[in-house]
Image (cartoon, rainbow, N blue to C red):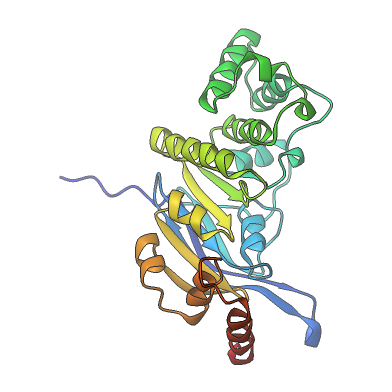
Amino acid sequence: MTSPPAPALLQVNGLRKTYGTGSSAVVAVDDLSFTLPPGGALGIVGESGSGKTTTARMLIGLERPDAGRILVQGEPLAPSVRGKAARLARAKAVQIVFQDPYLSLDARITIGATLDGVLRLHGSRDPATRADRVRALLAQVGLGDREAAALPRHLSGGQRQRAAIARALAVEPAVLVLDEAVSALDVSVQAQVLNLLTDIRRGTGIGLVFVSHDLAVVRYVCDEALVMYRGRTMEHRPVADLLGDPQHPYTRLLLASVPRPGWDPDSISRRRRGLDLRAP
């Protein structure tokens, strides 16, 4: 007798988020649904204002959906939490790495102390056990004792982002959301961080939701891509299929917008205006 399949790591059904009321209301996300398997990596792609960052904020509880639901490992993610235990449980379900690592790193304390504090908050009582875990987390992201003893301002941008990833991993979340997490890094450092994330998901089974406007990044690290425009899903397909044979005009416009030899920005602008006129 075969065992039933494991539940999806992350399941999003019919998410909707509106800002404002009446005639001035703006629909930021409209009927968004997707499923992320264990160890999967989904890229959510779109320009500024497409709804991708609002989606990320709903996944981690910074925004409350107006409709729809989010399940992590088959369990509904509460739209709001009260009390320390509920907050810690929410943190273990989904963590986020922001574009700016300073949002998650305390500038006043060292990287090692930051990680130690996260472990203490989540119930690790033994100092020696925490110290071992801190070293293991830093080693996992390619950092060592020197970086552990440093304040965030004494590290490079790539080192700070690695430290932010280590902080998110400290609670062993099921899902890691990365909101433009490499867009501020040099290209060579981007490649290092992307390789790191690929190794982590293969080694741990963690799921990645990669929010980005950069199609090259999504091609490199993700299995599937979901293209958003004005809060709606335009396409959701395997990355190779979507980027190799885009079906929606907006996806084709995104691909055409990447600078290359013979690139014509005026043509892109005309196509963009035409797409806006056809949009609902």
Instruction: Residue 123: give x, y in percent of width and height.
Output: 64, 23
Answer left or right for 279 relative to 21: left
Q: Residue at x 23, y 45 (%)?
A: 3
Image quadrant in which you'd find residue 86: top right
Instruction: Residue 214: give x, y in percent of width and height.
Output: 56, 58
Point out the residue furthest to the top here.
128
Q: Nearer the viewer, residue 182 or 51?
A: 182
Q: Nearer the viewer, residue 164 or 193?
A: 193
Position of the C terminus, as image quadrant, is bottom right
Q: Is residue 116 visible?
A: yes
Instruction: Residue 251: give x, y in percent of width and height.
Output: 49, 74
Q: Residue at x 59, y 79 (%)?
A: 268
Q: Nearer the viewer, residue 151 or 252?
A: 252
Position of the N terminus, as image quadrant, is top left
Residue 128 in the image: above or below residue 79: above
Answer left or right for 65 relative to 243: right
Residue 109 in the image: above or below residue 241: above
Q: Residue at x 63, y 81 (%)?
A: 266
Q: Is residue 280 visible?
A: no
Image quadrant in which you'd find residue 129: top right
Residue 55 in the image: above or below residue 217: below
Instruction: Residue 170: give x, y in percent of width and height.
Output: 59, 29
Answer left or right for 258 relative to 241: right
Q: Residue at x 53, y 61 (%)?
A: 44
Point out the residue furthest to the left here.
1
Total numbered badges shown on the rendered structure: 0
Point out the residue furthest to the right here.
108
Residue 54 in the image: above or below residue 208: below
